[in-house]
Image: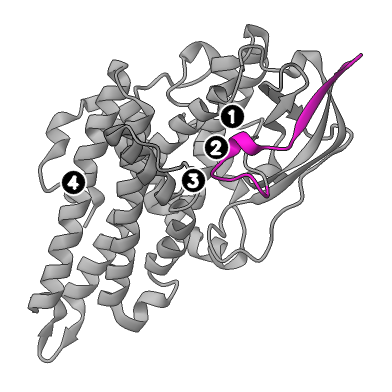
Amino acid sequence: MSSAEVDFLKLDLLLSDEEKLARDSIRAFVNERINPIIAECFEEGRFPMELIPELANLGVLGSNLPEKYGCAGVNNVTYGLITQELEAGDSGIRSFVSVQSSLCMYPIYAFGSEEQRQKYLPQMAAGKVIGCFGLTEPNSGSNPASMKTRARRVKDGWLLNGSKAWITNGTIADIAVVWARTDENDTIRGFIVEKGAPGFKAPEVKHKLSLRASVTSELVFEDCLIPETNILPESKGLKSPLMCLTQARYGIAWGAIGAAVSCYKSALDYAKQRVQFTKPIAGYQLTQKKLVEMLTEITKAQLLCLQLGRMKDSGVMEPIHVSMAKMNNVAMALECARTARGILGANGITADYPIMRHMCNLESVYTYEGTHEVHTLAIGKHITGLDAFDI
């Protein structure tokens, strides 16, 4: 059963031929290149670096940025469909693409100079320069305004001191887009820190039980000198990195659907084949109830993301809309994974099936890019006008 068949309300009728072609090409890539190796990568704790040139050739890196910078220039619905298919393979692969595209290429495009765009974006779209995004700190997660990393202006540029935590791609990155408080009215600015800069280290985080096919790192800056040419000139205040997070959360909302579909398909196929008490377990009421509920929630998430994508392409999407999609869809996917694991019984915990791998990954996705609880309270504030974050 292909994921094209997980389209109960025939939403393909609402997609353009170009959108479907892009989705189908990524789906084929996932089936041919990711699915055969990803369980082993997860067990080994290894990100498949060999796939980076292939992802670049497919045009998925910065795909919704302009063609003049070497990018594919696709619309946001297409970008969402790409992330959906990649996460059907693994959250770690989708995370790599999300970070490269939404958290590194986007800020250079949105807040960088034209010289910076021309220098970095074509190389990043080609997969020749890898980026990471440094915002989260050891004691500054859901409240990035409390960041301690500071940049002080000196004769030759800026002197950066501080640390960042839970950074996807950090150890393999050629550049880091780092956010720091400056000594100019305490304003938060963005800086491009190149690999090998004196005073910059990016040790990898080991012993993860989630996102194992992904590189997670710390970023440490000790009197790291950043040249004036590497500040993002249009980055001004906390709003700038939050705009980047909105881009990334949009892709996450779509990606979670891919993970849910993978779990649903595995459970459905298994339930049709697994015979107990003289017939397949798909023929029992309780199993059918679980499958129906999974499909229904997936369908609702598909509708949510499609409308969100059309709103983004029309320029009317707001960050709060993305909060609802991220909050709902990741929780939905995690519940689908848990339900699917139950249908497979003991087989559900093995790497022969993708379900437990998706479940472990989704536990991280549930938390990163804004926790489920923070997005809930952000929506609550929006609809009531009352700030529940206040103590």
Q: Is residue 70 left or right of residue 285?
A: right
Question: Could you tell me residue 265's position as x and y percent?
Answer: 25, 61
> For numbered disc 2, what is the local secondary structure?
helix
Picture layout, residue 232 above or below residue 168? above
The residue type indicated by label 4 comes to: Lys
Q: Mark yes or no: residue 25 visible.
A: no
Q: Secondary structure at mark 1?
A: helix
Quickly name the residue at label 2.
99
Distance from disc 4 to disc 3, alpha carbons, whole Å, reads 35 Å
SS label for mark 4:
helix
Percent across and percent down for residue 168 are 61, 45
Q: Nearer the viewer, residue 226 or 49?
A: 226
Q: Is disc 1 in contact with disc 2, using a CB cutoff of under 8 Å? A: yes
For the residues labelled 1 and 3, the Cα–Cα distance comes to 34 Å
For marks 4 and 3, the one nearer the N-term is 4
- N-terminal of the pair, mark 1 or mark 2, is 2
Q: Return the residue at label 1.
A: 104
Label 4: few (<14), some (14–19) or many (≥20) C-alpha neighbours in 10 Å: some
Residue type for callout 3: Ile
Q: Position of residue 241 (x, y in %)?
A: 56, 28
From which residue to which does the magenta span run?
A: 138-157
Q: Is residue 110 above or below residue 129?
A: above
Q: Which residue, given by chain and number where applicable, does mark 3 sit on?
A: 391
> Which tag, 1 or 4, sits closer to the chain's start?
1
| Mark whose residue sits in front, 4 or 2 | 4
